[in-house]
Each structure stands twice: as C-alpha cells, then as structure tokens.
Amino acid sequence: MTQDIFLTGITTTGTPHIGNYVGAIRPSIAASKDASKKNYYFLADFHALAKNEDPDKISQSTLEIAAAWMALGMDTDNSVFYRQSDIPEIPELTWVLTSMTAKGLMNRAHSYKAAVQANVEGGDKDPDKGITMALYSYPILMAADILMFKATKVPVGRDQKQHVEMARDIAQRFNHHYGDVLVLPEPLIDDATAVLSGLDGRKMSKSYNNTIPVFAAEKKLRKLIMKIKTNSLEPGEPKEIAGNTLYDMYNAFATQEETAEVAQLYKDGIAWGAMKQKLFEYINDHIAPARQEYERLIADPAIVEAELQKGAARAREVSAPYMDKIRSAIGIRKLG
C-alpha cells in the first residue's frame, strides 16, 4: 500500500489569527510530527498576487506566517516546509496544465463567478471588469501546487473543495491525453475543525477586519478580547453557550473538563467582563511560550529564510525529476 501524501498551502496575505491557528495551523503542526505521514506545507506567495496585494505586505506576511508556524512547533525535519516561489517547476507545470484546461471549467470556479456576480449587481456593463487572469486561472496554479508533489490528500475547508476537484479533473484530462503521469488528489474535509467567530460575531476573517492575531502583544490581546461583541444579559442571569463567541474560543483552546466548568459558569450567570478576562488569561498562557520564539524569529528573518531554503531544496528533489518526466510525456525533450 502506497503512503498518502498530504499537502497544505497558506496564502501570504495577512497576519495569522487565532481562527487560522485552531482551524489549520494547530492540526497541521500535529500532523507534521507524525512519522507515519508525508506532509508538504508551503507559503503560497504567487497566489497572493491574485489579490493584487501590496508588495511589502506580501513580504511581511511571508515572514510572519513562516515564523508563526515555526514558533508554534512545525517539525520541518519530518515534513517539507517551503515557499511556492522557490520552486520554478510549479509555474512551469501551471502553464502545461493551462494547455489542457477547458475554459468552461474555469468559468465555473466559485471565486470567478462571485467576482462576476459582484460586477453585475454593481451595475457594470462589463461582467469581467477588474477581473485579472490571475484570479480567473487561480485554480490551475492551485492544481499545479497539488499535482507537483503527487499529493493524494489535500486538507481543505468546504469552500476550497472545488479547487481540489478541479485539480483532479485537470489531472484526469492530462492523463487521458499523455498517459498515467499525474496522481489524482482527494479533498480531505474535517467537519470537526473549529470555525471561530471574530470580534463582531461574524466568521473571523481578514476580509471583515475582525481578527485576533495569534501573537498579539499581551496588552493588545486583552484589549481585542474585551471588544468581542456580547448580548445585554446582566451578571447573574443564565447565559447560552450555543453560538457564543467567548465560549467557542475558550472551547477551541481548553480541555473538555475546563470547558465543562465554563459551561457551568454560564448557567450560573458569569458576567461578560469576567468571562472575557478568563478567556484572555487562558489564551495568553497558551500562546506566551511560542510568542517569545515568534518575536525572536521576526527579529532575525535570516533564520526563517534558511529554513525555507532548506525546505525548497528538499522539495526540488521531488519536483525537478518529476517535471522532467512531465516534459518528456508532453514532447518537450532533448534532441540527442
């Protein structure tokens, strides 16, 4: 039985927040330490270009995300941790896959359809106004990320499932034309993964500007938690835990026993201010040791760069010979 290969990408478009941590970073770091698994983790900096991000912001985000994963315990010896743009075979494979991808498939991409709908609803005569080819063909680059390393399992949220299915469709079409060269991936969706609400009660997201950075300084962390939206129930009045942002955040970090104790405090009518203070203290205690390491890495980016270069070298041990095989399959070969 062949070993499954897992692949996870992190787009470099912001500062990691606690929603990212409990939803993706923490389970990925645990998996990176599992000797029975083969894991690839990469910083998707080319993907960031599809959002037209500021160049300095992409660079800073790359540093912050890499430092966060390293500080929180990523096992970079047992897994391959690299930057997308350090692997020249990925954009090369992207172009090869573009030559095999039907335009109709790209027309069905959720991100493209959402952009078109926004234009139509905004009254624009051109439904494609402002839509770049990077946004339109984003799923092809994602397919290259996945297929380059023969990934069999791609952990994604339900909103990203389509991209993995598209990668599979593209690979099947390629294999039909050129032979059994590419490995077909499968999306791996964990419905038990925590999805946290942000400061305003909506899903925690950079888009909503309602996030709590994982490594916010202690005073900033407390200030942000104190801003979390609550209802008007007074101290002493029983409170519901269902759909409560403070409870959900605590539950995402705490043990079952600790969470059960807090559920009882809700029944007893804990004051919102007291609950916010309790949440702050718990998260701060949990993050504090890694925060110190994160700050050390941010202050010395050369350490992070060296780790990414090490990962890139290991990744290219796979991507370079595989790309040679793909080139040969499509007829781009040396002549003698």
Image: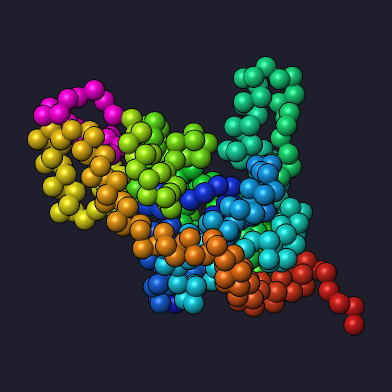
Res. 44 image quadrant? bottom right
As rendered, which of 211 and 318 lies closer to the eye? 211
The answer to whether 276 appears left or right of 31 in the picture is left
Q: Is residue 162 above or below residue 2?
A: above
Which secondary structure class fits the magenta region best?
A: loop
Res. 181 image quadrant? bottom right
The colour scheme applied to this rendered structure is rainbow
Residue found at the far front of this picture: 219
Residue at x 71% of width, y 66% of height: 89
Q: Is residue 28 magenta?
A: no
- What span is colored magenta in the figure? 230-246
Query: Is residue 271 at least partly visible in the picture?
Result: yes
Residue at x 32% of width, y 52% of height: 284
Marker count (numbered): 0
Image location (x, y in percent) of residue 135: 67, 42
Residue found at the far top of this picture: 123
Q: Is residue 240 magenta?
A: yes
Residue at x 74% of width, y 74% of height: 324
